[in-house]
Amino acid sequence: MSPKFDYNLQYAELDLRAHPELYRVGIGEQGVLLVQPYKSEILPHWHFATPDAASESSETIYALFLEYLKAGDFVGADMARKFLQMGFTRSRRYANHKGGKKYDGPVPDDKKGQSGAHGRAELPRTPEDPVKAESARIFKAKWEEAEANAEYAAMKKAHRAAYG
């Protein structure tokens, strides 16, 4: 099992391209909206409201994923992979919950920026939104393509061996 993503680091002040040793993959999408400079580079391209937006977005983010790999930048590649995964999960959330609200009540102040229910009840699902479901399918295909990339897998293994 890999070490957990460290939410205690001051990501707004850190450049993880310059300090990849501080990066931990964690689980799933952990840190996707924190790690700089990647958040600033990838987030402007992340859109899932329609299948057309999801197609353009996922293609652009996957191209960034490949650029990061080519540059030997594992942290960037992993962050791009996380944005592809988040495109899938957020699209699915909106497909299952009109308005995208999955849990009852606000996120506790000490849990902001972290994913999870944090003790809140899950709201009932609404009838599936086919548009958001298609956006989810598009992102899932690109996310799976990134996960299946042999160069990415080797870099991930090496990063974990070197840094945890």
Image (cartoon, rainbow, N blue to C red):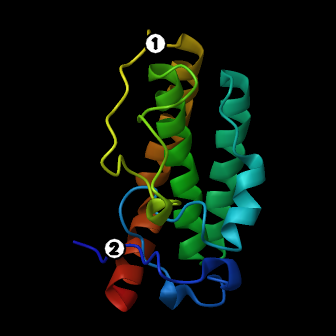
* Residue nearest the viewer, comparing 103 with 2: 103
Q: Position of residue 110 (x, y in %)?
A: 46, 66
Q: First in sequence: mark 1 or mark 2?
A: 2
Query: Which amino acid type is marked by label 2?
Result: Lys
Quarter of the figure with the C terminus: bottom left
Q: Badge 1: few (under 14), some or many (20 or more) residues near its Cα, within 10 Å?
A: some
Tell me what residue is drawn at x 59 percent, y 83 percent. Answer: 10
Q: Position of residue 11 (x, y in %)?
A: 61, 78
- Say which mark, if any, is on residue 4: 2
Q: Badge 2: few (under 14), some or many (20 or more) residues near its Cα, within 10 Å?
A: few
Q: Which residue is mark 1?
A: 128
**Farthest-out residue, top:** 127
Tell me what residue is drawn at x 41 percent, y 34 percent. Answer: 104
Tell me what residue is drawn at x 35 percent, y 46 percent. Answer: 117
Quarter residue 134 falls in: top right
Under tag 2, what secondary structure?
Answer: loop
Tell me what residue is drawn at x 49 percent, y 80 percent. Answer: 23
